[in-house]
Image: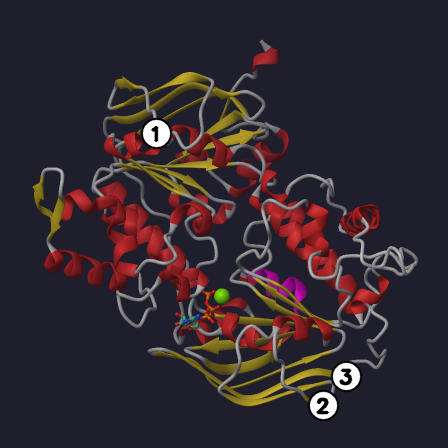
């Protein structure tokens, strides 16, 4: 199958030999699929199909059952009921390995990569190229492996060296490696579970190009995304799921966004109106000429009480790195940070929390959640002191379980976190619901300065507007918020002021009336906001 071409560069990456060039042949038919997890009916009598030469989008709110459905197709979960036919033949998909052999490749929402292996090793994992002679056939050929990985990365037009360890790459690049890994299998059926959640607009365009080329060569692609505008750009058909059921399947041209949203949530959702803005209070956080060699330089910014301040910029511009340095998750080389006018030297994230700061990271799995703990424990993690009844020196603390329960249940309800109980382990929640747990944790804490890094990544439309209205509520209660987001429209709607970061420097600051999508993009791409509007920061080399 797909592995046949490993190490034989004559075969093109995207021309699977086993795809019949019959237009729109049914590749996958899933009928009557049901799946129950303890306490949850994740799928109930779901029907879904995929044809050759199509991108079939799968939509639905957080917890609707999308990932569960495709994990059944990918051999990760076994179905409780239903039938799967592949190219007309009824098939039991026994394991992920078996799915690969059947020509099904998956790009997951949560990456499945090994940080300590090289990029090439990750791409070829599970199908390492071996030598062809009797002597060398048990030996993994590193050279062939690197060449193979390099070819795929080149086809993807991404600039990643195959030999560097994966852990040295940022989230977006890791996602590209995950995509390259799936492409290297040369399958006929591709499944992409939120592939663009961590990508910049340029990388998304690249991904779309590759996806279209896979379709044109006869493959079928199942495409899961919460970014509805992508559906119109890429998909041929759309299936909407709600609460573990299939609601409808439509041709993409008959599926305007408003209709899709209605199908997803069962009612229409208005785009949040731009908030009216309010006069900022006293200065909460001041960052003065913060620098980290080679990453960002001379970053100065202020956040006042009651303000939502955006930090915009392209992927790789240094947004996350600045937030991490403010929170002392990374070391800064120079610069000063003051909280309420008092200079502080933040030594560690713990220290930052004591100073009233909190940071919600973009990579929730690595930095945000204790997956093997319950929803309740994850939510109260940053606010234990608040629930402490009394402390026994050297022995531990006595927590007020009744208050914890009350508060956690309230948060779970207000953010609509889909979980059978607050005692459920976080690892069994859907991706978007895990993100909501991280948000709930910081909303519970007594922090006054919030650094939110992509808080709505992987979160559905409904929850997005809930998270933003909570951000506004926090600000109205006197908190100061730094909001990092790749979704420019959301920044426009939510922020009072926006700093724009480009190549590690703040190049512009937009005040409320100057904020527009065009101005943000212009500054992020070129370093200027156009004729007027925005206070340009003079770069050091211009001085
Ligand atoms: N391994 C598991 N154990 C227990 N429950 C699970 C497990 N995996 C998923 N679930 C539950 O099944 C339901 C469907 O989850 P699924 O991950 O398929 O949702 P999703 O549509 O992909 O959502 P999202 O958009 O948030 O990724 C959720 O209620 C989830 O909590
Ligand atoms: Mg999912």
The structure residue drawn at horizontal position 89% and vertical position 55%, both measured from the top left corner, is 9
Task: Give the mark nearer the N terminus: 1 vs 3.
Answer: 3
Q: What's the CA distance linking mark 1 and mark 2?
A: 58 Å
**Going by the picture, which residue comes out furthest to the front?**
135
State the residue in front, 478 or 331: 331
The structure residue drawn at horizontal position 56% and vertical position 45%, both measured from the top left corner, is 171
Q: Quick check: is 37 in the magenta stretch?
A: no
Task: Give the mark nearer the N terminus: 1 vs 2.
Answer: 2
Which span of residues is magenta-colored?
Answer: 229-236
Q: In which quarter of the image is the N terminus?
A: bottom right
Nearer mark to the viewer, of 2 and 3: 2
Q: What's the CA distance linking mark 1 and mark 3?
A: 57 Å
Q: Is mark 1 on a helix, strand or loop?
A: loop
Residue 428 at x, y percent in the picture: 40, 66
What's the magenta bit mostly, secondary-structure-wise?
helix
Residue with the mark numbered 2: 89
Q: Can residue 389 be seen in this view?
A: yes
Q: What element carries label 2?
A: strand
* Crowding near the residue tagged with mark 2, few <14, some 14–19, many ≥20 C-alpha atoms within 10 Å: few
State the residue in front, 438 or 121: 121
């Amino acid at each position: 199958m797909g592995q046949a071409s490993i190490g034989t560069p004559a075969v093109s990456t995207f021309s699977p030999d086993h795809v019949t060039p019959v237009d729109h042949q049914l590749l996958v038919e899933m009928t009557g699929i049901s799946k129950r997890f303890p306490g949850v009916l994740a799928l109930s009598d779901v029907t879904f199909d995929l044809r050759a030469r199509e991108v079939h989008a799968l939509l639905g709110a957080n917890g609707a059952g999308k990932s569960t459905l495709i994990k059944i197709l990918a051999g990760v979960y076994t179905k409780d009921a239903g039938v799967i036919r592949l190219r007309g033949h009824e098939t039991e998909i026994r394991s992920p390995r078996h799915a690969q052999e059947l020509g099904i490749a998956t790009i997951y929402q949560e990456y499945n990569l090994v940080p300590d292996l090289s990029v090439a090793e990750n791409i070829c994992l599970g199908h390492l190229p071996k030598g062809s002679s009797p002597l060398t056939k048990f030996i993994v050929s590193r050279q062939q492996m690197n060449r193979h990985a390099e070819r795929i990365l080149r086809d993807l037009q991404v600039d990643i060296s195959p030999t560097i360890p994966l852990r040295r790459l940022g989230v977006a690049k890791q996602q590209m490696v995950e995509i390259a890994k799936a492409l290297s299998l040369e399958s006929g059926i591709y499944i992409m579970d939120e592939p663009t959640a961590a990508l910049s607009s340029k990388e998304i365009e690249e991904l779309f190009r590759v996806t279209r080329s896979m379709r044109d060569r006869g493959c079928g692609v199942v495409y899961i995304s919460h970014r509805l505008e992508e559906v119109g750009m890429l998909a041929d058909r759309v299936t909407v799921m709600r609460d573990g059921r299939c609601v409808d399947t439509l041709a993409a041209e008959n599926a305007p966004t408003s209709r899709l949203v209605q199908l997803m949530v069962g009612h229409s959702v208005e785009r949040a109106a731009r908030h009216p803005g309010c006069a900022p209070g006293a200065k909460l956080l001041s960052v003065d000429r913060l620098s980290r060699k080679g990453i960002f330089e001379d970053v100065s910014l202020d956040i006042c009480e009651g303000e939502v301040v955006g930090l915009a910029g392209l992927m790789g511009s240094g947004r996350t790195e600045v937030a991490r340095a403010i929170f002392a998750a990374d070391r800064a080389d120079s610069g000063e940070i003051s909280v309420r006018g008092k200079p502080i030297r933040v030594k560690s994230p713990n220290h930052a929390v004591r100073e009233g700061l909190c940071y919600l990271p973009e990579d929730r799995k690595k930095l945000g959640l204790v997956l093997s703990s319950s929803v309740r424990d994850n939510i109260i993690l940053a606010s234990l002191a608040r629930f402490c009844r009394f402390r026994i020196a050297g022995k531990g603390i006595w927590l007020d379980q009744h208050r914890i329960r009350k508060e956690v249940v309230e948060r779970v309800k207000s953010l609509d976190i889909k979980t059978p109980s607050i005692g459920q382990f976080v690892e069994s929640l859907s991706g978007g619901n895990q993100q909501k747990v991280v948000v709930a944790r910081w909303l519970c804490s007594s922090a006054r300065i919030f650094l939110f890094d992509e808080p709505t990544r992987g979160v559905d439309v409904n929850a997005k507007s809930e998270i933003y209205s909570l951000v506004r509520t926090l600000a109205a209660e006197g908190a100061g918020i730094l909001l990092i987001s790749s979704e420019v429209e959301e920044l426009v709607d939510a922020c009072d002021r926006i700093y724009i970061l480009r190549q590690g420097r703040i190049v512009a600051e937009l005040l409320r009336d100057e904020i527009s999508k065009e101005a943000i993009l212009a500054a992020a791409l070129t370093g200027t906001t156009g004729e007027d509007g925005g206070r340009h920061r003079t770069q050091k080399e211009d001085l």
